[in-house]
Image (cartoon, grey):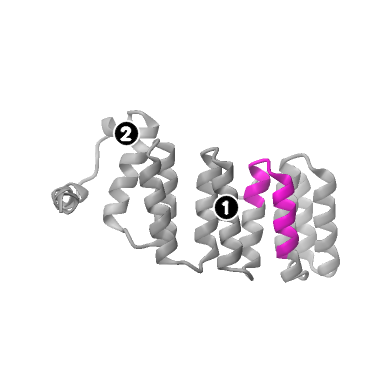
């Protein structure tokens, strides 16, 4: 009841923006405060709930983060991307066991989500977990060996981490999947030109 009263009192404030001075404070506290406001405005979107959780982790409010993650899983239990976002939040906060558990949950919740698996493999690669990234990307590839875009996306991530042999393996798979596709060859060219940097 007390929580509901606090929420009702906060509603008039939500209709107002904040001035510059409000955004000059401690970034971690601001992350938590803004996540609180966002959560009051739109509490039922599972992906946003997962992202609020990430902000709460940064703010040092683990209990609120876990509450958001749980609400996200309840809202969309079979959406693998929700589990991936939760994993990214944990990994970004240096909570490797929790992040890897969320990746395992993702695979159980949405076992054929090859695109989600690829995005998660790229995330794992970017968080310097190459063994786990390779295993998950293999699973994505087995689901659809003809998907050259996913192979290139992961190859780019390998280049970013100076794993040239791994990148070569994934670019070779892409070229074998669609040797007559000009967009595929251009994507590989740009991956090398950009040294694997994230695309705009």
Residue 66 in the figure: left or right of residue 136: left
Residue drawn 42% across and 59% down?
72
Label 1: few (<14), some or many (≥20) within 10 Å?
some
Q: Quadrant of the N terminus?
A: bottom left
- Magenta stretch: helix, strand or loop mostly: helix
The reply to whether residue 65 is visible in this rendering is yes
Which type of secondary structure does the marked residue at label 2 adopt?
helix
Image position, residue 14 (x, y; %): 21, 49
Q: Which residues are magenta?
A: 122-140
Assess whether mark 1 and mark 2 are in contact (beta carbons under 8 angstroms): no
Image position, residue 51 (x, y; %): 43, 51
Image position, residue 116 (x, y; %): 60, 62
Q: Nearer the viewer, mark 2 or mark 1?
A: 1
Mark 1 highlights which residue?
A: 101
Residue 116 in the figure: left or right of residue 45: right
Mark 2 highlights which residue?
A: 23
Image position, residue 24 (x, y; %): 33, 29
Residue 12 in the figure: left or right of residue 187: left
The reply to whether residue 178 is visible in this rendering is no
**Rounded to the nearest whole Å, what is the CA distance between mark 2 and mark 1?**
34 Å
- Residue closer to the observer: 152 or 8: 8
Which type of secondary structure does the marked residue at label 1 adopt?
helix
Label 2: few (<14), some or many (≥20) within 10 Å?
few
- Residue closer to the observer: 143 or 156: 143
Q: What number of labels is visible?
A: 2
Residue 129 covered by magenta stretch: yes
Residue 82 in the figure: left or right of residue 147: left
């Amino acid at each position: 009841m007390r929580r509901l009263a606090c929420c009702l009192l906060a509603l008039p404030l939500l209709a107002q923006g904040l001035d510059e001075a409000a955004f000059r404070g401690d970034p971690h506290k601001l992350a938590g405060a803004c996540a609180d406001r966002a959560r009051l405005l739109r509490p039922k979107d599972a992906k946003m709930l997962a992202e609020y959780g990430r902000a709460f982790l940064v703010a040092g409010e683990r209990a609120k983060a876990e509450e958001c993650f749980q609400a996200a899983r309840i809202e969309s239990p079979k959406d693998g991307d929700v589990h991936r976002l939760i994993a990214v939040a944990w990994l970004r906060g240096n909570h490797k066991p929790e992040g890897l558990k969320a990746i395992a949950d993702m695979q159980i919740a949405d076992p054929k989500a090859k695109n989600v698996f690829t995005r998660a493999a790229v995330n794992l690669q970017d968080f310097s977990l190459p063994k786990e990234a390779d295993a998950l990307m293999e699973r994505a590839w087995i689901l659809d060996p003809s998907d050259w875009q996913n192979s290139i996306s992961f190859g780019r991530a390998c280049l970013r981490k100076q794993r040239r042999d791994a990148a070569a393996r994934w670019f070779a798979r892409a070229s074998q999947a669609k040797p007559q596709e000009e967009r595929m060859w251009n994507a590989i060219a740009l991956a090398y030109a950009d040294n694997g940097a994230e695309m705009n």
